[in-house]
Amino acid sequence: MAPATQAPVKNGEAPAAGDERDPAASRLHGFSRDELHGLLADMLLYRRFEEKAEEAYAIGKIGGFCHLHIGQEGLAAGSIKPLRADDLVITAYREHTQAIAKGIAPRAVMAELYGRVGGCSGGRGGSMHLFDTTVGFYGGHGIVGGQIPLGAGLAWAIRYRGGDQICVCFMGDAAVNQGAFLESLNMSAVWQLPVIYVVENNGYGMGTAFSRVSVTEMEARSGAYGIPAHTVNGQDVLETYRFFEELAERVRGGAGPQFVNAITYRFRGHSMSDPVSGTYRSKEEVEAHVQGEDPITILRDRLMGAGLLTQEELEAVDAEARTASDDAAEFADASPLPDPSTLYDHVYAEINPHGRLFLDGRPGAPGSGPEGGGRG
Amino acid sequence: MGVRGLRGVARKAAAVAEITYREALNAAMCQEMDRDDSVFLLGEEVAEYDGAYKVSRGMLARYGDRRVVDSPISELGFAGLCVGAAMSGLRPICEFMTFNFSILALDQVINSAAKMLYMTNGQVPIPMVFRGPTGAALQLSAQHSQACESYYVHAPGVKLVTPATPADAKGLLAAAIRDDDPVAVMEGELLYNVRGEVPDEEYVIPLGVAEVKRPGNDVSIVTHGKMVHVALQAARALEREEIEAEVLDLRSLRPLDVDAILETVAKTNRVVYLEEGWPFAGVGAQIVSLIQDEAFDELDAPVLRVTQADVPMPYAKNLEQLAKPGVKAVVEACRKVLYMEVGIS
């Protein structure tokens, strides 16, 4: 079941924690050179993919809302790559790179952004509704906090069936002010569901700083429900990976629900209609984060500093990421628009033999006889 | 409100028992839980309390707390949890103590359950049931007395049934549980004690099949849910004036048995739509639109609607009575579409 992209990083053989550098074995933080290059390649792919999407949006190839994950790649790779292929991921609408991390091909993600049949949701979902259940990616949800009870439900189903998978449910920092969050955390604790709630804490819900809409710190939000809180630096992919690797196994082993405050930063606007800095944060603030907290730069510098990456290798990895992103865009562009005859497909899984399900009176609606919406 | 002798029980010489509507719902859930382990019941007070209206009486003892689950009072949360479980292929029965409270959960009903299959291009069906009572009972006042059909039936992706009799309750709830889409099953507090004959054996009524609860040639009262009983009372009152009213119980609003509607229109040429909800964007508005689109030439009079008064439900007994659609209003509407004098009976 595991696609090739699912587990490029192999676990095990890790030296004792804290052994930052083991020159003899060419390891960093317990990761082999290949593993480290794999994570760098993943993050560069996410970056180049999003830049390609940005470009495509600018020339009208992508419509609607488009929320980029640029700056948050360390978290996408570090939290999703350690998971098993049959673990489930559900998230909000800034999810292009998370979808790729869980195993959806960049082509299928880009084609979805383009609204084409080759998209992972057949062009029906768009940027905010990426799905591929065969790799355990359950969307892609557009209402802030709406995915949180769904994530609890996915975890409920795992427990109901006695499985040993876990569900990782992502949300933005603003989602913790939704009732859905509070209700889901409480139920998850009551029923000890195998779920990790991850706040991608980039500091802003759209243009509102978290500190302006909460008098408590993020870490305090889960304690009232008896759910342990953890904080991780999402800009450090190695730390994040090790953290989630360990936490996932604990939850798999029955530790119950967990809450993770993953610190990150969004290098672009909330969506394509929001300028990079906007009116709610200064250019200087954004620039400081881009300079000092770019997860890709951080990993690159550590690898180079440890003698585990050459400039040539970096350029080769980056070229691959650009090629894959270009390829995704070419694939998307060539993929056809959905056939108009499919408009009514997948509204219902079961078209009942009796009665009319579609009341718009248009020809072509199923279950309405040969004349469509007419006399049934 | 007796419904004995109604034609609601379509059966072939099978064993029947006279049970309550409440017991019929319980029988449907047990019937389906016995045959499919993926079906479970979750909601407020469904387990240890035996159900706020005792619909799930005995089910905790029979199925255990894995499958009969008391939830916190978190309608948005537990409705969403059930949708999430359905995303994974389970078949939850999500009980709302009343559909009034489900307004808190409408984000999950509309944005998640109804749209999931479409957004995922068919990858993720939501085979689940939302059930509980809708509409008014007695003097429960504004927030506990409203018909919620319109909210649900408005959204493509949702199906909706409204059983009026014990037999329909068993057959339609069973069908709803087996259906691969989200189905709202709207019951009624005032229906739970209604008794009627219900087949003992496995019993399923297909969605989308209306039923003539009383045949007649002069005027059609088309309705659904507990208003069926009001319609039958009105028909009996009209009978005294030698007017034979046909009562068509839609039973299922989505899918909608359009053929049955058009048949009764063609038969009597005069229609009154009776519903418990408000008129604006109500179910009846859709039915009137459908009839004028597809059977305009069959009509001898404009279709009239009898609905709740366009006000929140008042508490005071006299005002509540005035606000509810009652037998008198139905009789008068029928006389009106028959171009008879009104207000003299």
Image: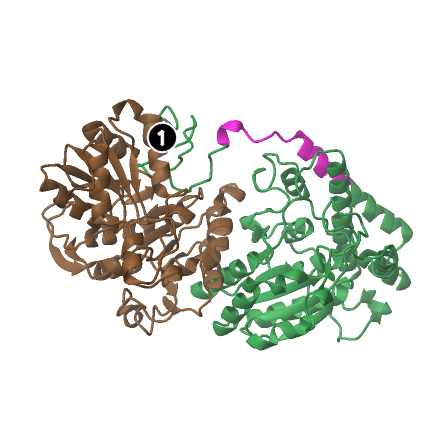
Chain colours: A green, B brown
Q: Is residue B268 above or below residue B72?
A: above
Q: Is residue B35 above or below residue B256?
A: below
Q: Is residue A281 above or below residue B273?
A: below
Q: Residue placed at 61% from the left, 41% from the top? A: A126
Outermost residue to the front: B344
Location of the C terminus of chain B (image quadrant): top left
Q: Nearer the viewer, residue B205 or A28?
A: B205
Q: Quadrant of residue B300?
A: top left
Residue A12 shows in the view: no
Q: Quadrant of residue B18?
A: bottom left
Q: Is residue A57 left or right of residue A183?
A: right
Give the overall secondary structure of the magenta segment.
helix
Q: Residue placed at 30% from the left, 71% from the top? A: B50
Q: Position of residue B287 (x, y in %)?
A: 33, 36
Chain for mark 1? A
The span picked out in magenta is A323-342
Residue A130 shows in the view: yes
Q: Residue placed at 20% from the left, 45% from the top? A: B231
Tell me, yes or no, whether the highlighted magenta stretch contains residue B127.
no
Q: Amino acid at mark 1?
A: Ser
Outermost residue to the top: B297
Location of the N terminus of chain B (image quadrant): bottom left
Tell me, yes or no, whether the highlighted magenta stretch contains residue A331.
yes
Helix, strand or loop at mark 1? loop
Q: Is residue B36 left or right of residue A30?
A: left
Q: Residue placed at 63% from the left, 31% from the top? A: A335
Q: Is residue B188 left or right of residue B65?
A: left
Q: Nearer the viewer, residue A143 or A123?
A: A143
Q: Position of residue A184 (x, y in %)?
A: 53, 66
Q: Disc 1 designates what residue? A: A368
